Image (cartoon, rainbow, N blue to C red):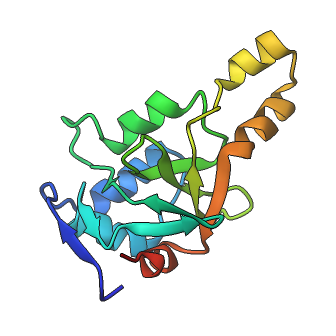
Amino acid sequence: MSNINWRSWDEPVTKNEVENVGEKLGVKFPLDYIEVAMDYNGAHVSPELFQVEGKEKVFGTLLTYNVEDDEHILEVFNDYQDTLPKKLIPFAFDPSGNLICFDYKNHEDNPIVVFWEHENAWEKEMLIEEEGLTEEQAEERARENVFYVAATFTEFLDKLHD
């Protein structure tokens, strides 16, 4: 993580503020993420590239804890929750509006990092009503847009390159 350069961040936040948001989302954020979010709230990063299934993706910005901002972590979660699979909690955007998330499914204590692609993502309720899918089938369909990136937040940062 030593080769990371953070820039253009918002006011720092406390560990308590980050943990409180996690509680509102029903999760416990990993400590390595909390430490970065506290100091580099809403920041851009260099290097910014990472691989998802052999394709280059871009880390845009960390979501912010500034409640006045459109990219406030709770606001982003609320905006996307009808489309996001259960147990996915976004912590960053890419420049195309896709999300970098923690996936707590089968990883309650140590969430993995995944990339959620918004293209071809449908609201789960619509899939149930219009395509006649069950809730479980709609959830499976929603997970088709989720791609593994790293086992931990630190490992994700270590994978960033130019």
Q: State whether residue 80 appears in this view.
A: yes
* As drawn, 35 above or below 24: below
User: Residue at the location (15% across, 54% down)?
Assistant: 10
* As drawn, 104 above or below 70: below
Residue 79's quadrant in the figure? top left
Residue 141's quadrant in the figure? top right
* As drawn, 54 above or below 126: below
The x, y position of residue 85, in whole percent, is 66, 40
Which one is in front, 21 or 72? 72
The x, y position of residue 75, in whole percent, is 37, 34
User: Residue at the location (82% across, 27% down)?
Assistant: 135
Q: State whether residue 111 appears in this view.
A: no
Which one is in front, 40 or 51? 51
Which one is in front, 25 or 156? 156
User: Residue at the location (76% across, 20% down)?
Assistant: 127
Whether residue 2 sits left or right of residue 150 in the image: it is: left
The x, y position of residue 108, in whole percent, is 65, 62
Whether residue 111 sits left or right of residue 31 in the image: it is: right
Which quarter of the image is occupied by the C terminus? bottom left
The x, y position of residue 65, in whole percent, is 26, 49
